Amino acid sequence: MRVLKISPRGYCYGVVDAIQMAKRVARDPAVPRPIYVLGQIVHNRHAVDGLRDLGIITLDGPDRMVLLDQITIGTVIFTAHGVSPAVKAAARTKGLNCVDATCPDVTRTHDLVLDLVAKGYEIIYVGKRGHPEPEGVIGEAPEHVHLVETLAEVDMLNVETPRLAITTQTTLSQWDTQAIIDRVKLRYPHVQVHNDICHATQERQNAATTQVEEADLVVVVGDERSNNSKRLVHVVREIAGRPAVLVDDVEHLSPELLQGVGTVAVTSGSSTPSEITRAVIQYLEHFEPDPDAE
Ligand code: SF4
Protein backbone atom coordinates (compact mmCIF):
# COMPACT_ATOMS: atom_id res chain seq x y z
CA MET A 1 0.00 0.00 0.00
CA ARG A 2 1.21 3.52 -0.75
CA VAL A 3 1.92 5.34 2.51
CA LEU A 4 2.30 9.13 2.87
CA LYS A 5 4.24 9.96 6.02
CA ILE A 6 3.00 13.32 7.25
CA SER A 7 5.74 15.52 8.66
CA PRO A 8 6.12 16.82 11.30
CA ARG A 9 4.29 14.28 13.45
CA GLY A 10 4.68 12.62 16.85
CA TYR A 11 6.58 13.60 19.98
CA CYS A 12 6.92 17.33 20.68
CA TYR A 13 9.68 18.89 22.80
CA GLY A 14 7.40 19.19 25.85
CA VAL A 15 6.65 15.47 25.84
CA VAL A 16 10.27 14.48 25.17
CA ASP A 17 11.45 16.64 28.08
CA ALA A 18 8.78 15.28 30.47
CA ILE A 19 9.59 11.65 29.70
CA GLN A 20 13.35 12.21 29.90
CA MET A 21 12.92 13.99 33.23
CA ALA A 22 10.90 11.05 34.61
CA LYS A 23 13.51 8.57 33.39
CA ARG A 24 16.36 10.56 34.97
CA VAL A 25 14.48 10.59 38.27
CA ALA A 26 13.87 6.82 38.11
CA ARG A 27 17.57 6.14 37.51
CA ASP A 28 18.81 8.36 40.33
CA PRO A 29 19.30 6.25 43.49
CA ALA A 30 19.31 9.42 45.64
CA VAL A 31 15.70 10.26 44.74
CA PRO A 32 13.24 9.29 47.54
CA ARG A 33 11.07 6.25 46.80
CA PRO A 34 8.37 5.39 45.87
CA ILE A 35 8.17 7.58 42.77
CA TYR A 36 4.69 8.56 41.61
CA VAL A 37 3.36 10.47 38.61
CA LEU A 38 0.24 12.51 39.32
CA GLY A 39 -1.84 11.48 36.28
CA GLN A 40 -0.47 10.06 33.04
CA ILE A 41 2.91 11.66 32.25
CA VAL A 42 1.51 12.21 28.75
CA HIS A 43 -1.75 10.80 27.46
CA ASN A 44 -0.42 7.59 25.94
CA ARG A 45 -0.61 4.18 27.56
CA HIS A 46 2.58 2.98 25.86
CA ALA A 47 4.53 5.88 27.37
CA VAL A 48 2.96 5.15 30.77
CA ASP A 49 3.87 1.44 30.49
CA GLY A 50 7.47 2.45 29.71
CA LEU A 51 7.71 4.37 32.99
CA ARG A 52 6.08 1.52 34.94
CA ASP A 53 8.90 -0.73 33.72
CA LEU A 54 11.33 1.72 35.38
CA GLY A 55 9.47 1.40 38.70
CA ILE A 56 7.42 4.62 38.43
CA ILE A 57 3.83 4.39 39.71
CA THR A 58 1.24 6.30 37.68
CA LEU A 59 -1.83 7.40 39.65
CA ASP A 60 -4.69 8.06 37.29
CA GLY A 61 -7.97 9.88 37.82
CA PRO A 62 -9.75 13.13 37.01
CA ASP A 63 -8.71 15.17 40.09
CA ARG A 64 -5.02 15.79 40.93
CA MET A 65 -5.80 16.70 44.54
CA VAL A 66 -7.65 13.40 45.07
CA LEU A 67 -4.71 11.52 43.53
CA LEU A 68 -2.33 13.32 45.86
CA ASP A 69 -4.30 12.00 48.85
CA GLN A 70 -2.97 8.53 47.97
CA ILE A 71 0.68 9.59 48.46
CA THR A 72 2.30 9.87 51.88
CA ILE A 73 6.03 9.53 51.20
CA GLY A 74 8.53 9.63 48.34
CA THR A 75 8.61 11.62 45.12
CA VAL A 76 5.80 13.04 43.03
CA ILE A 77 6.20 14.05 39.39
CA PHE A 78 3.82 16.66 37.96
CA THR A 79 2.97 15.88 34.34
CA ALA A 80 3.54 17.88 31.14
CA HIS A 81 -0.06 19.20 31.46
CA GLY A 82 0.79 21.17 34.61
CA VAL A 83 -0.96 21.37 37.99
CA SER A 84 -2.65 24.07 40.04
CA PRO A 85 -0.73 25.97 42.74
CA ALA A 86 -3.00 24.32 45.34
CA VAL A 87 -1.76 20.86 44.30
CA LYS A 88 1.89 21.99 44.40
CA ALA A 89 1.41 23.51 47.85
CA ALA A 90 -0.33 20.39 49.19
CA ALA A 91 2.49 18.15 47.90
CA ARG A 92 5.10 20.35 49.61
CA THR A 93 3.11 20.40 52.86
CA LYS A 94 3.18 16.60 52.83
CA GLY A 95 6.98 16.78 52.61
CA LEU A 96 7.10 15.06 49.22
CA ASN A 97 10.03 15.49 46.85
CA CYS A 98 8.39 17.36 43.93
CA VAL A 99 9.57 17.11 40.31
CA ASP A 100 7.84 19.45 37.88
CA ALA A 101 7.66 18.18 34.26
CA THR A 102 5.17 20.85 33.15
CA CYS A 103 5.76 21.87 29.52
CA PRO A 104 7.14 25.43 29.26
CA ASP A 105 4.30 26.30 26.87
CA VAL A 106 1.75 25.40 29.56
CA THR A 107 3.71 27.30 32.20
CA ARG A 108 3.52 30.36 29.94
CA THR A 109 -0.29 30.27 30.14
CA HIS A 110 -0.15 29.94 33.96
CA ASP A 111 2.14 32.99 34.09
CA LEU A 112 -0.11 34.93 31.72
CA VAL A 113 -3.17 34.26 33.89
CA LEU A 114 -1.34 35.39 37.02
CA ASP A 115 -0.10 38.54 35.29
CA LEU A 116 -3.52 39.47 33.88
CA VAL A 117 -5.36 38.81 37.15
CA ALA A 118 -2.82 40.98 39.00
CA LYS A 119 -3.71 43.78 36.54
CA GLY A 120 -7.41 43.39 37.30
CA TYR A 121 -8.51 41.33 34.28
CA GLU A 122 -11.21 38.69 34.02
CA ILE A 123 -10.11 35.86 31.72
CA ILE A 124 -12.08 33.72 29.30
CA TYR A 125 -10.24 30.42 28.90
CA VAL A 126 -11.01 28.19 25.90
CA GLY A 127 -10.39 24.60 26.95
CA LYS A 128 -11.71 21.13 27.43
CA ARG A 129 -13.67 20.48 30.61
CA GLY A 130 -12.18 17.59 32.64
CA HIS A 131 -8.72 17.78 31.00
CA PRO A 132 -5.80 18.27 33.44
CA GLU A 133 -4.37 21.31 31.63
CA PRO A 134 -7.43 23.55 32.20
CA GLU A 135 -7.66 22.20 35.77
CA GLY A 136 -4.13 23.48 36.43
CA VAL A 137 -4.47 26.84 34.64
CA ILE A 138 -7.88 27.70 36.13
CA GLY A 139 -6.49 26.75 39.54
CA GLU A 140 -4.23 29.83 39.36
CA ALA A 141 -7.25 32.11 39.91
CA PRO A 142 -10.51 30.12 39.87
CA GLU A 143 -12.70 33.12 40.64
CA HIS A 144 -11.37 35.12 37.65
CA VAL A 145 -11.03 32.47 34.92
CA HIS A 146 -14.15 31.49 32.94
CA LEU A 147 -13.93 28.21 31.03
CA VAL A 148 -15.70 27.95 27.67
CA GLU A 149 -15.69 24.93 25.40
CA THR A 150 -18.27 25.81 22.74
CA LEU A 151 -19.80 28.73 20.86
CA ALA A 152 -23.02 28.21 22.84
CA GLU A 153 -21.09 28.69 26.07
CA VAL A 154 -19.71 32.00 24.76
CA ASP A 155 -23.28 33.18 24.28
CA MET A 156 -24.03 32.37 27.92
CA LEU A 157 -21.04 34.31 29.30
CA ASN A 158 -21.67 37.19 31.65
CA VAL A 159 -18.37 39.01 32.18
CA GLU A 160 -19.14 42.70 31.82
CA THR A 161 -15.82 44.35 32.59
CA PRO A 162 -13.54 46.70 30.66
CA ARG A 163 -10.54 44.51 31.50
CA LEU A 164 -11.22 41.28 29.70
CA ALA A 165 -8.77 38.84 28.12
CA ILE A 166 -9.05 35.48 26.39
CA THR A 167 -6.51 32.66 26.31
CA THR A 168 -6.57 28.99 25.34
CA GLN A 169 -5.51 25.44 26.09
CA THR A 170 -2.39 24.47 24.11
CA THR A 171 -3.71 21.46 22.18
CA LEU A 172 -7.02 22.62 20.65
CA SER A 173 -8.05 22.77 17.01
CA GLN A 174 -6.79 26.13 15.78
CA TRP A 175 -9.86 26.54 13.53
CA ASP A 176 -12.48 25.77 16.21
CA THR A 177 -10.62 28.00 18.65
CA GLN A 178 -10.50 30.90 16.19
CA ALA A 179 -14.27 30.58 15.73
CA ILE A 180 -14.73 30.82 19.51
CA ILE A 181 -12.36 33.81 19.74
CA ASP A 182 -14.25 35.53 16.91
CA ARG A 183 -17.56 34.97 18.73
CA VAL A 184 -16.08 36.42 21.93
CA LYS A 185 -14.83 39.45 19.97
CA LEU A 186 -18.34 40.03 18.62
CA ARG A 187 -19.74 40.13 22.16
CA TYR A 188 -16.75 41.88 23.74
CA PRO A 189 -14.90 43.89 21.04
CA HIS A 190 -12.43 45.21 23.63
CA VAL A 191 -11.20 41.72 24.65
CA GLN A 192 -7.42 41.26 24.73
CA VAL A 193 -6.60 38.09 22.74
CA HIS A 194 -3.85 35.60 23.67
CA ASN A 195 -4.03 32.49 21.52
CA ASP A 196 -1.92 29.93 23.38
CA ILE A 197 -2.25 26.91 21.08
CA CYS A 198 1.36 25.72 21.08
CA HIS A 199 3.65 25.78 18.08
CA ALA A 200 3.96 21.95 18.04
CA THR A 201 0.17 21.53 17.89
CA GLN A 202 -0.20 24.10 15.11
CA GLU A 203 2.60 22.56 13.04
CA ARG A 204 1.11 19.07 13.30
CA GLN A 205 -2.38 20.31 12.43
CA ASN A 206 -1.09 22.34 9.47
CA ALA A 207 0.83 19.32 8.15
CA ALA A 208 -2.14 16.99 8.63
CA THR A 209 -4.48 19.26 6.70
CA THR A 210 -2.15 20.12 3.80
CA GLN A 211 -0.38 16.82 3.07
CA VAL A 212 -3.38 14.49 2.72
CA GLU A 213 -4.91 15.52 -0.61
CA GLU A 214 -4.03 12.18 -2.24
CA ALA A 215 -4.97 10.04 0.75
CA ASP A 216 -8.03 7.77 0.71
CA LEU A 217 -7.68 7.45 4.47
CA VAL A 218 -5.68 9.27 7.15
CA VAL A 219 -4.51 7.19 10.10
CA VAL A 220 -3.76 9.18 13.26
CA VAL A 221 -1.73 7.14 15.74
CA GLY A 222 -2.59 8.18 19.27
CA ASP A 223 -4.33 7.35 22.50
CA GLU A 224 -8.08 7.85 22.99
CA ARG A 225 -7.20 10.09 25.99
CA SER A 226 -4.89 12.34 23.96
CA ASN A 227 -6.57 15.64 23.16
CA ASN A 228 -4.02 16.64 20.52
CA SER A 229 -4.41 13.26 18.72
CA LYS A 230 -8.22 13.55 18.69
CA ARG A 231 -7.94 17.13 17.39
CA LEU A 232 -5.79 15.82 14.51
CA VAL A 233 -8.58 13.42 13.50
CA HIS A 234 -11.08 16.24 13.80
CA VAL A 235 -9.14 18.76 11.67
CA VAL A 236 -8.36 16.20 8.95
CA ARG A 237 -12.09 15.47 8.64
CA GLU A 238 -13.35 19.04 9.03
CA ILE A 239 -10.62 21.13 7.38
CA ALA A 240 -9.03 18.76 4.85
CA GLY A 241 -12.30 16.89 4.18
CA ARG A 242 -10.60 13.47 4.23
CA PRO A 243 -11.70 10.38 6.18
CA ALA A 244 -9.61 9.85 9.30
CA VAL A 245 -9.35 7.25 12.07
CA LEU A 246 -7.59 7.23 15.43
CA VAL A 247 -5.65 4.03 16.18
CA ASP A 248 -3.82 3.32 19.42
CA ASP A 249 -1.24 1.03 17.82
CA VAL A 250 -0.71 -1.53 15.06
CA GLU A 251 -3.04 -4.02 16.80
CA HIS A 252 -5.94 -1.70 16.03
CA LEU A 253 -5.44 -1.84 12.27
CA SER A 254 -7.52 -4.38 10.39
CA PRO A 255 -7.99 -5.44 6.75
CA GLU A 256 -11.64 -4.26 7.04
CA LEU A 257 -10.49 -0.76 7.96
CA LEU A 258 -8.21 -0.64 4.92
CA GLN A 259 -10.68 -2.05 2.44
CA GLY A 260 -10.73 0.03 -0.77
CA VAL A 261 -7.80 2.19 0.40
CA GLY A 262 -5.03 2.69 -2.19
CA THR A 263 -3.13 5.52 -0.50
CA VAL A 264 -3.02 6.04 3.23
CA ALA A 265 -1.50 9.01 5.08
CA VAL A 266 -0.10 8.58 8.59
CA THR A 267 0.42 11.11 11.34
CA SER A 268 0.57 10.86 15.12
CA GLY A 269 -0.20 12.93 18.18
CA SER A 270 2.55 14.72 20.07
CA SER A 271 2.23 12.18 22.90
CA THR A 272 2.67 9.09 20.68
CA PRO A 273 6.01 7.23 20.95
CA SER A 274 7.84 7.06 17.60
CA GLU A 275 8.23 3.26 17.67
CA ILE A 276 4.42 2.84 17.87
CA THR A 277 3.96 4.98 14.75
CA ARG A 278 6.86 3.20 13.01
CA ALA A 279 5.15 -0.17 13.54
CA VAL A 280 1.92 1.19 12.04
CA ILE A 281 3.76 2.55 8.99
CA GLN A 282 5.57 -0.78 8.46
CA TYR A 283 2.30 -2.71 8.68
CA LEU A 284 0.69 -0.41 6.12
CA GLU A 285 3.67 -0.51 3.75
CA HIS A 286 3.51 -4.31 3.67
CA PHE A 287 -0.27 -4.53 3.56
CA GLU A 288 -1.64 -6.10 0.38
CA PRO A 289 -5.37 -5.44 -0.12
CA ASP A 290 -7.42 -8.57 -0.84
CA PRO A 291 -8.29 -8.29 -4.59
CA ASP A 292 -11.48 -10.34 -4.03
CA ALA A 293 -12.75 -8.02 -1.29
CA GLU A 294 -15.49 -5.61 -2.32
FE1 SF4 B 1 3.98 21.32 25.29
FE2 SF4 B 1 2.50 21.63 23.11
FE3 SF4 B 1 3.78 19.37 23.53
FE4 SF4 B 1 1.69 20.00 25.07
S1 SF4 B 1 1.64 19.57 22.85
S2 SF4 B 1 3.63 19.15 25.76
S3 SF4 B 1 1.97 22.22 25.18
S4 SF4 B 1 4.74 21.38 23.18
Image: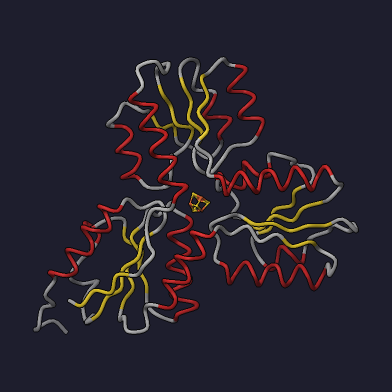
Write the residue at 39% across / 27% down.
Answer: 25
Above or below for 5 versus 250: below
Q: How is the image coloured?
A: secondary structure
In the image, taking residue 143 as reference, residue 12 lies left or right, namely left
Above or below for 267 versus 32: below
From the top left corner, tell me how far across and down residue 149 is, in percent.
64, 60
Q: Residue 181's image quarter?
A: bottom right
Write the residue at 58% across / 47% down.
Answer: 106
Query: In the depicted view, which residue is nearer to us: 96 or 18?
Result: 18
In the image, taking residue 9 as reference, residue 185 lies left or right, namely right
Q: Quadrant of the N terminus?
A: bottom left
From the top left corner, tell me how far across and down residue 139 is, in percent.
68, 39
| Number of on-image labels | 0
Q: Residue 233's image quarter?
A: bottom left
Write the residue at 87% across / 55% down.
Answer: 163
From the top left corner, tell me how far across and down residue 112 is, in percent.
71, 48
Q: Quadrant of the C terminus?
A: bottom left
Write the residue at 42% across / 55% down.
Answer: 270
Query: In the depicted view, which residue is nearer to us: 98 or 52?
Result: 98
In the image, taking residue 161 as reference, residue 220 lies left or right, namely left
Q: Residue 155's image quarter?
A: bottom right
